[in-house]
Image: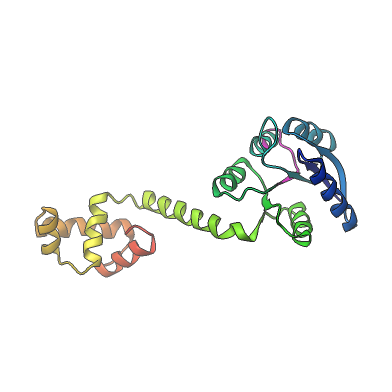
Amino acid sequence: MISVLLVDDHPVVIEGLRKLLTAAGDIDVTGEAHDAAEAIEQARKLRPDVILLDLRMPGASGVQATRRLRELDSPAAVIILTSYGDQAYVRQALEAGADGYLLKSTGPDQLLTSIRAAARGRRQLSPELLDGVLTEFGGLAREQTRREADLSEDEREILRRASKGATNREIGLATGRSEIAVKKRLQGIFAKLGAVDRAHAVAEAIRRGLI
């Protein structure tokens, strides 16, 4: 049996979830709480496998409660169950240590599947939130790549002009450098990107999101 702690400040939500989960047969609702403080107390007392945690509650938020649970080394998988789909909330919850973020519009079967998966250590996310999370992750990854590549804005400008077919002389005239200086800067860029020539450097810079 998968033990679940329900946390929501609306009794009707708690009751609906309790009926759904109990009917599943392999899930046991071991307790309920109506605010963050009570959720932390119940989690320490009951040590459930999964905590379904509302995001907006009186007092501390679900994100704050999640962070506190992680500080206390709670073994429970925490799934935020909320009606708020803002990417900022999703990011904050995941950064706090939540194992999942589901919208209350999630279908009953999907909710049960997510609880079972979370109990096995798999992270869960409502499908409609996935594109936004991946887009944000891609942006962060590109920014990390830019930092790791350590290309200056001047070097990126040279690459941008090179990508449009400008010669070293043309790049020099546009940026106030000599043709020889541009050639040397390009050689430095090649080394940073692990590129063997101009075309390779441009392709690698585009792939990494540098230009």
Q: Residue at x 20, y 55 (%)?
A: 185
Residue 196 image position (x, y, % from top left) = 28, 66
Q: Quadrant of residue 109?
A: bottom right
Q: Please state if 120 lies on the left or on the right of 127 as rendered.
A: right
Q: Please state if 163 lies on the left or on the right of 28 as rendered.
A: left
Residue 45 image position (x, y, % from top left) = 84, 33
Q: Is residue 91 above or below residue 161?
A: above
The magenta stretch spans which residues? Answer: 70-80
71 drawn magenta: yes
Of residue 2 and residue 104, the one placed in the foreground of this image is: 104
In the rendered image, the quadrant that contains the C terminus is bottom left
Q: Residue at x 85, y 40 (%)?
A: 31
* Residue 1 visible within the image: no
Of residue 149 and residue 173, the one placed in the foreground of this image is: 173
Residue 137 image position (x, y, % from top left) = 50, 54
Residue 151 image position (x, y, % from top left) = 30, 51
211 drawn magenta: no
